[in-house]
Image (cartoon, helix red, strand yellow):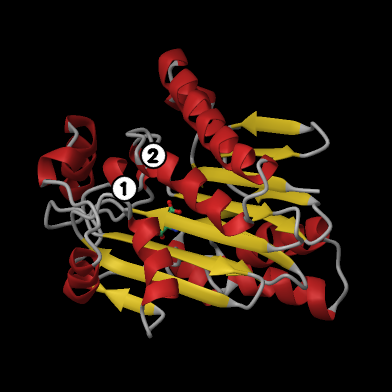
Amino acid sequence: MYTIAIHGGAGVINRNSLNAEEEKLYLEGLEESLNIGYKLLEAGKNALDAVEAAVISLEDNLMFNAGKGSVFNSDGIHEMEASIMWGKNLDAGAVSGIRNVKNPIQLARAAMEKSPHLFLNSSGAELFAKELDFPFEDDSYFFTTKRYDQLLEAKKDSRVQLDHFADNFGTVGAVALDSFGNLASANSTGGLTNKSYGRIGDSPLIGSGTYANNNTCAVSCTGDGEFFIRGVVAYDISCLVEYKNMSLADACNLVIKEKMVKLGGEGGVIAVDKSGNVALVFNSGGMYRGFKKHDGTSEIAIF
Ligand code: ASP
């Protein structure tokens, strides 16, 4: 039994904000990522490998706000963040404020596996990436006119925004259950357009944006980072499953559609539990999302 689910961000996404060509590119990007992760699970690889590979595929895709497609911060640069968690032993790795690293999720995994520390930040994290010979890219690799225009728009009225409010790009993430019963979760983002230097969102924070525990579930979040941090959303869902015996769907619905709404936070989660149940829940207009299960069921959707 194995299952994978992915997200490419949640926010104000509606049919009017996406043209047919863009919609096609998003759906193709989601499908590609899902298939890459699924094939690894099918070949007997573990959930950690599957979520990492699925996220790398989205990081390399210009359509999404992570890696190559990352949004600009207020200084007109890209500061990326990512995290990964292994439900088997609750091990985790995270990076934030990193520049020019091609695949932040790989660095998060390296922080987990090759560093005595869990969370590395900024220039220290970049130094660690250099020591490991990780690929770096020039600023030009991360530049798109469209994304730059988003920044200029946001700066006009001093807005800090989820990238998809101005356009349709999203933070990315993946959760998986492998055939050995292990759960893993991953998250990667460029954060918010026009964010201030040094701002850290929920995506690299274990418990807020990312959580995985073999006894409960794996969760990856996307949305208003500040609210997801305050709600400790990913861990809250795991706790409801563990301590209140709630089903995954009920736990996700309670946290996203009731608690987050009350708090004023917009966004969504993808989650898979130890039995392979999947929940893709959001309180926003849309969420780029998909799942694929060993029993042949799958879905890819935006709205
Ligand atoms: N959660 C991310 C952040 O606040 C944004 C997103 O999910 O698109 O940085």
Mark 1, secondary structure of its residue: helix
Asked whether residue 164 is in view, the answer is yes
Label of residue 80 in the image: none
Q: Nearer the viewer, residue 198 or 52?
A: 52
The vertical placement of 254 against 69, above or below, is below
Locate ligand 1 by image quadrant. bottom left
Label of residue 67 in the image: 1
Q: Nearer the viewer, residue 143 or 51?
A: 51
Q: Position of residue 299 (x, y in %)?
A: 70, 32
Label 1 amino acid?
Gly
Name the residue beneath numbered marker 2.
64
Q: Position of residue 177 (x, y in %)?
A: 71, 55
The answer to whether 133 appears left or right of 166 in the picture is: left
Q: Nearer the viewer, residue 240 or 185?
A: 185
Q: Which residue is depicted at the point 38% across and 74% down?
A: 114
Asked whether residue 269 is in view, the answer is no
The vertical placement of 158 against 290, above or below, is below
Q: Position of residue 80 (x, y in %)?
A: 29, 58
Q: Nearer the viewer, mark 1 or mark 2?
A: 1
